[in-house]
Amino acid sequence: MPHCNGGMTMKPILWLAAITAAAPMAVYGQFEFANGKLWATAEERARVEYRANNIAFNNDIRQDTDVWLLQRLRAGLGVKPLDWLKLYGELQDSREIGSTRYPLNTDPEEDRLDWRQGWIEVGNGKDFPLLLKVGRQTLGYGEERLIGAFDWNNIGRVFDAAKLRWQADKWWVDAFGANVVNNNVTSSRDGTFDDRADWADDFFGLYGQCRAMDKHLWELYALLRNKTDAAYQGPARRIYTLGARLASTEKLAPWDYYVEFAGQFGHIQGGGGSYFGETNTTAAVQRAFAGTIGAGYTFSHDWKPRLALEYNYASGDRNPNDGVNETFDNLFPTNHKFYGFEDFFAWKNVHNPHALFAVTPLKNLKLQLDGHLFWLAQKEDAWYRASQTAVRRSLSGAAGRFVGSEMDLTASYTVNKHLKLLAGYSRFFCGSFVSRTGAHDDADFVYVQVTLGL
């Protein structure tokens, strides 16, 4: 039977006191001067996290429960010498303090001082429809289900990329070529200015948006990920992704909705490892798809109550040895926003109904309750964490499909334009799949985040 952990120590209280004391030094936002020819950006974020049973789901493993402080400082400077020319550089320093947590096969959340962004942008969009941006930069499209900055993470995600935008009044199209920047390509958490792009992982895309209708927007995209080695983030592969997204604009209020579907084809080499269901050791054809649909309504009440329902699906692999990989490749997403805040799921081999209720009892206070249910799309494939690595697998399928459920309660409060607070509690309730494949103690996640600004 799942059972509760033996209570929190003084450690999280001390970390909370630490970030509160440090808050006056923290800044975020943008400040312009010299008539907009120069601008500076800065952000300091501190978050205490307490996690219990988040890796092994086993109360008997001491390292499976821990508390730590995540601290992230960003500072940037931009210059606009000409109306059609911008240059920007940004530094980032990320620290993980006090952690002894059970090791995961994922990125660390510490990356000491390094360049986060450094780009040049040519064009202004007013006199000529083309805009070119080259250098280290963030990429984010749609809701960031496939391409996102992953800003919840203490390090985030950036690319060394070239992006060309063709823009008109009601539509735009981006063409880009990019390589993700991995802070641990050099296998070091201690070095400074050592982050490098993974030149063995090429990412190309066409992404367009049209707002020809006032209350609706639609997006189309074609993506190619060409990974030539298996050194980082799974096997070598060449995967094409074609997709479409339809969503409401603010003019449809009080209703809102979104629909997105994506299909994949191509191939992977040398087996799927912990990233895909196919274990064929030579090569496999890629054939996968994913989709999401959601709608919400905001009631005309002083508290602005909003109720929303969502369903997420991503295909899984039926047979690990048939030479066809049906596990969807989640690419470069911001998964934290979508499949439970404990980060136990990706857009891979999953059925996920989701309900949300939010209220704003005060002008700057928002309370939100999310509920999730999780099943495996294919019971022979793995359960994949938000990092896209497998948690557990039942090759025979005997463990069934139901992985569990999650409840997330969050509160966000904007004290004033200088201070923002975020707090949350999440609990994951283990299902029959977890209990049949090993330890199955329920998991808890508590966090408090402080951000201050100009």
Image (cartoon, rainbow, N blue to C red):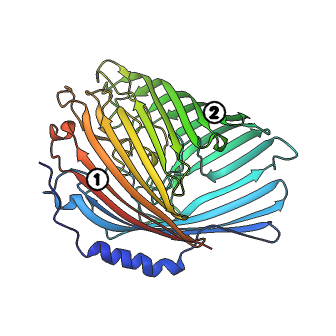
User: From the viewer's perspective, is 200 left or right of 64?
Assistant: right
Residue receiving disc 1: 427
**Picture coordinates of residue 26 (x, y %)?**
53, 75
Q: Earlier in the sequence, mark 2 or mark 1?
A: 2
Name the foreground residue: 26 vs 89: 26
User: From the viewer's perspective, is 307 left or right of 89?
Assistant: left
- Is residue 376 placed above or below 99 in the rendered structure? above
Does residue 207 appear anywhere in the picture?
no
- Is residue 386 placed above or below 36 in the rendered structure? above
Q: Give the residue displayed 49% in from the left and 43% down from the top.
A: 333
**Picture coordinates of residue 182 (x, y %)?**
48, 51
**Picture coordinates of residue 212 (x, y %)?**
74, 33
Badge 2: few (under 14), some or many (20 or more) residues near its Cα, within 10 Å? many
Name the foreground residue: 266 vs 192: 266
Q: Give the residue displayed 46% in from the left and 79% down from the top.
A: 22
Element class at badge 1: strand
Rendering quarter of residue 269: top left
User: What residue type is disc 1 on?
Assistant: Arg
Q: CA distance from mark 2 to mark 1?
A: 35 Å
Residue receiving disc 2: 219
